[in-house]
């Protein structure tokens, strides 16, 4: 469906979703102390989409994702691979801050992702989805353990899914997790490049599978 939309139509649809998020009352988090819902930010044609857990204190104040210390670390890691925030799209599993930064509840995750996140993914159609932390990992790698699968991508639905630690977890254990996070982050541009080569080999395979053209009509 996304291929049939112009960039302007995609932009309008994503801005429509953002407006819905800001006024959303679908789950109890809307009344749990929310100052601003945080729909997500970045490029509507991003090749790479980052999905965190949920807004924290600063994100709730500003209505933007990853603006505190975790955001600074994310910026540093992006810069390490030659990318800027404006080139990627950053959002969360739930768009409103859970009170006292508690974990989002299963029902909140189900309601919010079905209402917004999956539509955002469909419209942006990223080549690589990077999950940050165990809640977004759980959407695409059910029952996995982050300590076991971080940095190990899987390909599905024509894109790569790369599970990474949440930057907040890295900040709590810089000595051990920062080198691992940097190594995992370096895979992102490699996966974008692999996406292109996978596309061209798929195209070549389907072209060679087509029956040879008829040379005569009789
Ligand atoms: S967390 Fe999601 S579903 Fe719940 S109120 Fe906020 S936007 Fe709506």
Image (cartoon, helix red, strand yellow):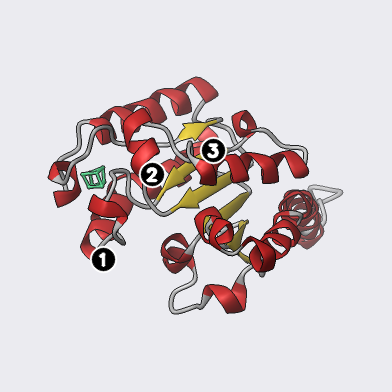
Residue 184 falls in image quadrant: bottom right
Residue at mark 1: C-beta within 8 A of ligand 1: no
Secondary structure at numbered mark 2: helix
Q: Is residue 121 left or right of residue 150?
A: left
Q: Are marks 1 and 3 in contact (CB under 8 Å)?
A: no
Q: Earlier in the sequence, mark 1 or mark 3?
A: 3
Callout count: 3
- What residue did someone put label 3 on? 89
Judge whether 148 appears above or below 80 on screen.
Answer: below
- Residue at point 44% right, 60% down? 136
Q: Which mark is residue 106?
A: 1
Q: Earlier in the sequence, mark 2 or mark 3?
A: 3
Label 3 crowd (10 A; few <14 / some 14-19 / many >=20): many
Q: Is residue 69 left or right of residue 177?
A: left
Q: Earlier in the sequence, mark 2 or mark 1?
A: 1
Q: Are marks 2 and 3 in contact (CB under 8 Å)?
A: no
Q: Nearer the viewer, mark 2 or mark 1?
A: 1
- Residue at point 60% right, 44% down? 74
- Out of 147 and 90, give the one closest to the viewer: 147
Q: Nearer the viewer, mark 2 or mark 3?
A: 3
- What residue did someone put label 2 on? 119
| x and y, in percent, of residue 188 in the image | 71, 52
Determine the quadrant in which ligand 1 lies. Answer: top left
Q: Is residue 189 left or right of residue 106?
A: right
Judge whether 102 appears above or below 72 on screen.
Answer: below
- Residue at point 48% right, 39% down? 68
| x and y, in percent, of residue 69 in the image | 52, 43
- Out of 7 and 183, give the one closest to the viewer: 183
């Amino acid at each position: 469906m996304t291929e049939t939309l112009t960039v302007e139509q995609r932009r309008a649809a994503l801005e429509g979703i953002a407006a819905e998020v800001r006024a959303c009352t679908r789950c109890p988090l809307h009344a749990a102390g929310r100052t601003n819902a945080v729909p997500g930010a970045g490029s509507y044609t991003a090749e790479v989409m980052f999905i965190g857990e949920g807004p924290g204190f600063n994100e709730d104040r500003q209505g933007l994702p990853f603006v505190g210390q975790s955001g600074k670390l994310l910026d540093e890691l992006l810069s390490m691979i030659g990318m800027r925030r404006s080139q990627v799209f950053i959002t969360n599993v739930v768009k409103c801050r859970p009170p006292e930064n508690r974990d989002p509840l299963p029902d909140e995750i189900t309601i919010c992702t079905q209402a917004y996140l999956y539509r955002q993914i469909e419209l942006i159609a990223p080549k690589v989805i990077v999950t940050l932390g165990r809640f977004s990992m759980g959407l695409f790698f059910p029952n996995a353990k982050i300590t076991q699968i971080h940095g190990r991508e899987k390909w599905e639905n024509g894109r790569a899914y790369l599970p990474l630690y949440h930057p907040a977890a890295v900040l709590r254990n810089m000595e051990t997790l920062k080198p691992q996070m940097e190594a995992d982050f370096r895979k992102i541009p490699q996966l974008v490049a692999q996406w292109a080569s996978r596309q061209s080999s798929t195209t070549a395979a389907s072209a060679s599978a087509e029956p040879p053209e008829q040379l005569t009509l009789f």
